[in-house]
Image: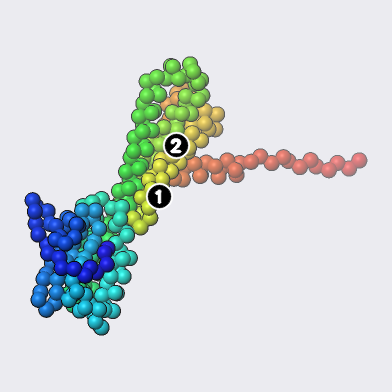
Amino acid sequence: MSEVLKLQNTVQRYNGKYVLDGNESEVKYLIYHNAHPKCGEVIVFVDNELDLDWECDDTASQLTDEMPLKASVRKILNQVAVLEPIVHNWPDDLKLMAKRLLGEAVASVLCDDVVGAEAAIENAKKFIIAKSRQVSRYWTLQSCLITGGVAALVGLLEVLARFTIIGLLGRTTFLMSLCFCAGCVGALLFVVMRLGSQPTADSTTERQLHYLEGVARIGGGGIAGVLIGGMVSLGLVLPVFSQAGMESLAMCSAAMIAGASERLVAGIITRTEGNETTVPETPNVDK
C-alpha cells in the first residue's frame, strides 16, 4: 500500500486497462475514484500485482488528517493491514475478491463514511474467515492427492516389473515396498472419505506447511502399511492367509486398511505391548 501521494492523478482507460496519469501504476480493478473540487481526488484500486492501493491529492489528504476522521482512518487502515496479508498466497480470483472488499472499506473511510467503512470491514472479515478454511483444505487436499497418486503409480509400476525387482532386491523388499504404496493409497482413501468432516486450519499459516502436512499424512499411512504388512508376513496378524498361500494379497490388503485407519496400528501396538510374557516365579523349596 502506498503512502498518500501529493500529486494530482486522473484515471483513464486504454485498451481495456485503467492507468493513472502522473503515476506508472496500472489499475487491474478500480474500486473507487472521485474527483471533487472541495473534497479533492481519491482513488482506491487493486494493481496488476493484486496489491490494494490508494492515493489522495493534497485536498483529500488535508481532510483525512483532520480530527476526528484521522482516528477513524487509522483504525480502518490498521484493520486492513491485519487482514490483507492473510490472503497473500490465495488463488488470484479469491485474492481479488478479498482485496475488493477491503478496498471498499478504505474508500468509505477516505470519503468520511465511517459507518460504511466499519460495515465493509466486517463483511471482509466474514469472507476471509470462510474462504480461509476452504483455501487451507484445498492446499492440504492437493498435496494429499499428488502424494497418494504418485504412490499409487509407483505401486502399479512395481507390480508390472515385479519379477525384475524381486530378482534385484529380493521378495521381502518388494513386498515391503508394495505395502508402503498400499498404505499411502489407504491414507488417501481416508482423507477423501472424510472430506468436509475433518477440522481444518486456516490459511494464515504458510502454504508450504499445508503441503508438508498433506505429505506427512500420506507418508504416515505408508509407514503404517509397512508395519502391518511385516506383521502379516511374520504371521502375527492374519496367519490364515499365509497358510493358504495368499500372503502377498493379505499383506497389501492389511497395509491399505492400516493406512486408512487411524486406530488400527495404535491398537495392535497396544495389544502387543500388553501381551508381554512374564517368567513365572520359582517356588521356594525348603531343604
- Outermost residue, bottom side: 67
**Tag 1: residue type?**
Leu
Q: Is residue 259 above or below residue 134?
A: above
Query: Is 226 or 34 nearer to us in this picture?
Result: 34
Work out whether residue 158 or residue 251 is closer to the camera in this orientation and state it: 158
Q: Residue furthest right?
A: 287
Nearer to me, 28 or 8? 8
Q: Does residue 23 lie above or below 185 as drawn?
A: below
Whole-percent x, y for residue 269 in the image: 54, 42
Residue 128 appears in the rendering: yes
The residue identified by callout 2 is 222
| Crowd around label 1: few <14 · some 14–19 · many ≥20 (10 Å) | few
Q: Which residue is mark 1?
A: 209
Residue at left offset 35%, top offset 47% = 140
Report the residue at 30% width, 55% height from top.
Answer: 88
Report x, y in % for residue 218.
41, 40
* Residue 130, horizontal then vertical, whole percent: 27, 59
Q: Residue at x 44, y 39 (%)?
A: 219
- On residue 13, which mark appears? none
Tell whether 236 sits left or right of 147. Answer: right
Q: Circle 2 — which element?
A: helix
Q: Quadrant of the N terminus?
A: bottom left
For the residue pair 269 and 191, the one nearer the viewer reads as 191
Q: Label 1 to label 2, Cα distance in Å? A: 20 Å
Q: Position of residue 188 (x, y in %)?
A: 36, 40
> From what the image shows, is residue 216 above or below residue 98?
above
Quadrant position of the C terminus in the picture: top right
Picture residue at 12% right of the left edge, 57% below the top? 18
Mark 1 or 2, closer to the camera: 1
Q: What residue type is disc 2 on?
A: Gly
Callout 1 secondary element:
helix
